[in-house]
Amino acid sequence: MKFLLSHLGITKYVLATFSLFISMAQAHVVLETPVVFTGAYYKAVFKISHGCDGSPTQQVIINVPEGFKGAKPMVKTAWDISVLKDKLQKPYTSHGKKIIEDVTKIEWKNGNLPSEFYDEFVIVGQAPMESGPLYWKVTQICASGKLEWNEIPAEGKTLKDYKNPAAALKVVVDPEDHSQHQH
């Protein structure tokens, strides 16, 4: 705790703790860690806390936002996983190789997450080099019904202004530049 406070400062610690409690109380899909440094490798943990009006979740589709590089899903026992790759408008280099297509959508399907249970769906990859918000559109398909977590705030609005907000990731500049090879 002392280490955390000395590195984050008390104000940032209080804000981070407050954000965690807020995100846990919300009923929509949220990221466990909603902030990442530019260019850093990141583990996106999407928290699913309920089904569709009591119906179990059987499929989760996550659209990978433009700029997030090399997305890889974590395997979930008893769920099938598929990834969709598309050609990039701006190719990039990774490990000395030119990347011209990348993952744009990840789908977990044929699973069963009862509405009264909680689970997490995980993707790893690299955050963009530019700071700013990154929104992840998530579709949750249940045995009966579907939830689209896809609303992106208009200028002057926040995620709290929407019924079905996309999961938000704030990409911030790292004063110590951790963009070097860290995965």
Image (cartoon, rainbow, N blue to C red):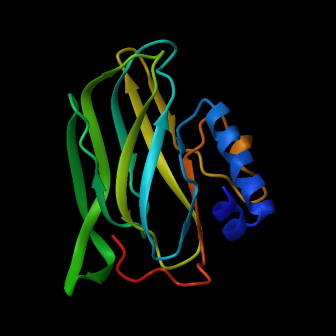
Does 60 appear above or below 171?
A: above
Quadrant placement of the C terminus: bottom left
Find residue 154 and report its image quarter: bottom right
Q: Position of residue 136 (x, y in %)?
A: 48, 52
Number of numbered markers: 0
Q: Nearer the viewer, residue 138 or 36?
A: 36
- Vertical order, 117 against 18 (above or below): above
Q: Nearer the viewer, residue 86 or 124?
A: 124
Q: Residue at x 23, y 76 (%)?
A: 100
Residue ID at (70%, 39%): 22
Left or right: 136 as drawn, with respect to 182: right
Q: Position of residue 133 (x, y in %)?
A: 60, 64
Specify the quadrant that holds the N terminus. Answer: bottom right
| Residue that extends furthest to the top in the rendered view of this protein | 54
**Residue in the picture at 43% in, 13% down:** 55
Residue 138 x %, y %: 45, 42
Q: Determine the image quadrant of residue 15.
A: bottom right
Q: Position of residue 146 (x, y in %)?
A: 43, 25
Left or right of 123 on screen, residue 44: right
Residue in the picture at 69% in, 66% down:
8
Q: Quadrant of residue 75?
A: top left
